């Protein structure tokens, strides 16, 4: 039930029993992400002061080493999760290998693995444009009591127990799902509290926005070129509007609210596209499906793909159901 002025903390407690595994640990984990999000938000908001406070690699007036923001965000999420006895391993875009975390009794009792892109779209920071954090949560599949293994991370997206993102935009929001719909919470920065602002978010079935880096058009497969031409054609409710921030979280967030499709296809210069299956595409695909949208590589639902590598890339088409089905049609026809 949605209550007026409900905070994220209250929502987590109230909905604990509806989680797929209601042991209380997943609630703790989401609480930890909420805390880390506030710390990262504070750092992201200071980014414009870099000339005053010191750039990455420099020592600031307090004698502190300045870190790049994506490195800083990575450290904040890892340290916040490490200290909470819930997570047995973390994989991050910023780390070559996964990180093993032991429980305090040294017995590897923690159940969950987290995969994270700590600061997605980070090239936007220098120009004061929105960036995001993306997270994906699984239960480990190897037995409790032993260190986490690579198989615990290489699970298909269908096994996710929760996923979400934080968008550091005009307002900072956390949007997540535990498999029971998608809810969005907006930060009131004055008091550091997230409030339920967007309950039960739903993708419009149809949309009028397409988001793709059209500078790469010449390198795209024929089916994608044909779909872009279709979007631009004057017919029915077309031409569609083109909107591309270059920050997956922000582009997806807008499209989920207004109706649209985000595309990062494979191309002649990027065999499997750019985006990473495990900590970019799968969590966004889980949110998309939970909100009534779709996510595909052009042929298969993203969450049905069995991963083979931690940093695997995959072509990505995600958004309003009818738009994703349409681009799939074009891709499959031209194949
Ligand atoms: P990043 O993880 O290095 O920031 O890359 C991911 C980002 C997405 O957020 C965004 O949609 C895409 O890369 C933009 O790439 P491009 O500049 O090639 O269009
Ligand atoms: Mg990224």
Image (cartoon, rainbow, N blue to C red):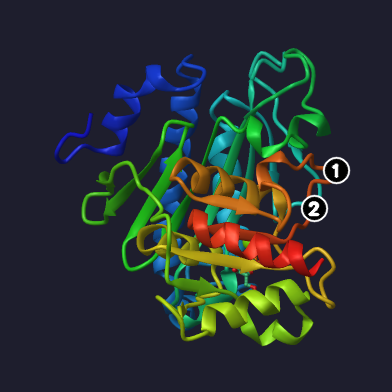
Q: Residues within 10 Å of mark 2 (few under 14, many from 20)?
A: some
Q: Is residue 68 visible?
A: no
* Furthest residue toward front: 236
> Which residue matches tag 2?
312
| Distance from mark 1 CB to nearest ligand 2 atom below 8 Å | no
Q: Are marks 1 and 2 in contact (CB under 8 Å)?
A: yes
Residue shown at 71%/56% (left/top)?
A: 297
What percent of the width, then of the height, locates residue 204? 38, 56
Residue shown at 29%/23% (left/top)?
A: 14
Up/down of 328 relative to 183, above or below: below
Image quarter where ligand 1 lies? bottom right
Q: Secondary structure at mark 2?
A: loop
Q: Quadrant of the N terminus?
A: top left
What percent of the width, then of the height, locates residue 51? 48, 83
Q: Nearer the viewer, residue 43 or 131?
A: 131
Up/down of 200 relative to 72, above or below: above
Q: How many marks do you count on the picture? A: 2
Up/down of 73 relative to 209, above or below: above
> Which residue matches tag 1?
308
Q: Nearer the viewer, residue 97 or 164?
A: 164
Residue 19 quadrant: top left
Residue 59 placement, left or right of 242: right
């Amino acid at each position: 039930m949605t209550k007026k002025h409900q905070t994220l903390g209250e929502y987590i407690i109230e909905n604990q029993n509806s989680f797929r595994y209601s042991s209380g640990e997943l609630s703790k984990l989401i609480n930890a992400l909420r805390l880390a999000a506030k710390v990262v938000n504070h750092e992201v908001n200071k980014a414009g002061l870099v000339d005053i406070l010191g750039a990455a690699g420099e020592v600031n007036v307090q004698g502190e080493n300045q870190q790049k923001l994506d490195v800083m965000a990575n450290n904040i999420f890892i340290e916040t999760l490490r200290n909470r006895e819930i997570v047995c391993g973390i994989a991050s875009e910023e780390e070559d290998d996964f990180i093993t975390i032991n429980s305090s009794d040294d017995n590897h009792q923690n159940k969950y693995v987290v995969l994270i892109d700590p600061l997605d779209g980070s090239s936007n920071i220098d120009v004061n444009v929105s960036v995001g954090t993306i997270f994906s949560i699984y239960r480990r599949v190897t037995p409790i009591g032993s260190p986490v293994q690579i198989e615990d991370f290489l699970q298909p997206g269908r096994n996710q127990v929760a996923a979400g993102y934080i968008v550091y935009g005009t307002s900072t929001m956390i949007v997540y799902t535990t498999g029971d719909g998608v809810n969005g919470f907006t930060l009131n920065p004055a008091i550091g509290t997230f409030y339920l602002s967007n309950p039960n978010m739903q993708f419009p079935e149809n949309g009028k926005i397409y988001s793709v880096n059209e500078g790469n058009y010449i390198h795209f497969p024929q089916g994608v070129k044909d779909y872009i031409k279709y979007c631009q054609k004057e017919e029915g409710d077309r031409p569609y509007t083109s909107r591309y921030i270059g920050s997956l979280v922000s582009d997806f967030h807008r499209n989920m609210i207004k109706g649209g499709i985000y595309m990062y296809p494979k191309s002649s210069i990027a065999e499997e596209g750019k985006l990473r299956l495990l900590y970019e595409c799968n969590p966004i695909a889980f949110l998309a499906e939970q909100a009534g949208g779709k996510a595909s590589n052009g042929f298969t639902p993203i969450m049905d793909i069995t991963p083979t590598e931690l940093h695997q890339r995959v072509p990505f088409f995600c958004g309003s159901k009818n738009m994703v089905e349409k681009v799939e049609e074009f891709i499959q026809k031209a194949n």
